[in-house]
Image (cartoon, grey):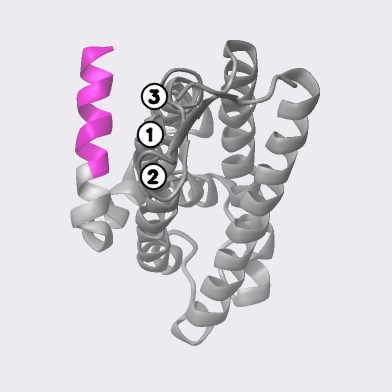
Amino acid sequence: MKEIMKKIIERIKQLIFKPKETWDMIKAEETDEMGILKNYLLILTAFPALALFIGRWAIGLQIGNFFPYVKTYRFGFWSSFVTAVFWYVLTIASIWLAGKVISYLAPKFGSLQNDLNAFKLSVYSSTPLLVAGLLRIIPNLEILVVILGIWGFVILYFGLPIMMETPDEKKLPYYVVSVAIYICIYIILGAIISILSKIFGPDLPVPTS
């Protein structure tokens, strides 16, 4: 496990600081979807899921403009746990689905239809959002998670033509459509998690201060 974590951390640094060079390396790697899932995605996604759980249950959301009018609201253990579990499962499913859609659309943009390369593209371009998700341990930083996660679109920009072998004249439209796919999937993801959390973890946030 220690060796796997070292590889994950190294891959995160490569993607964030050297995205263009890293994609050539990723494309050449001999692996499969299950290997990427077990050795990268399942592990990396667990950390923001845990942060989400702790943030909702133990830290709480602060509401108010200034002291002494600031109140901290904490969700119950069950609600927090259920939300974190749903977020974990549905995030992984969303990343997988995004890869499938990108691969399916590839021929329409003169690109190579390749499920493995599209899965790599979806997983690794989601890395900044997953890493930024650690900030969910402080619920009030949710907007910062979104802002930092935008770097994933930069990584996607560099990776799309390499992984899907997209011709120059098709790069921009394929990229725009891919970004739209991600945004739509994550909006739907958020809505589903909200609904499921209310159904299976209906306890309301409790003000503690």
Q: Please give left or right for residue 139 compared with residue 86 in the image.
A: left
Would you say residue 89 sits in the magenta stretch?
no
Q: Amino acid at mark 1?
A: Ile
Residue topped by disc 1: 138
Quarter of the view holding residue 48: top left
Please state, as top left, top right, bottom left or bottom right, where the C terminus lies in the image: top left
Q: Please give left or right for residue 190 compared with residue 51 in the image.
A: right
Q: Bounds of the magenta span?
A: 1-12
Q: Residue furthest bottom?
A: 169
Say whether residue 34 is visible. Answer: yes
How far apart marks 2 and 1 lie (CA) works out to 6 Å
Quarter of the view holding residue 40: top left
Q: Please give left or right for residue 142 compared with residue 24 in the image.
A: right
Residue topped by disc 2: 141
The residue drawn where x is 63% and y is 12% is: 78
Q: Amino acid at mark 3?
A: Asn
The tag on residue 205 is none
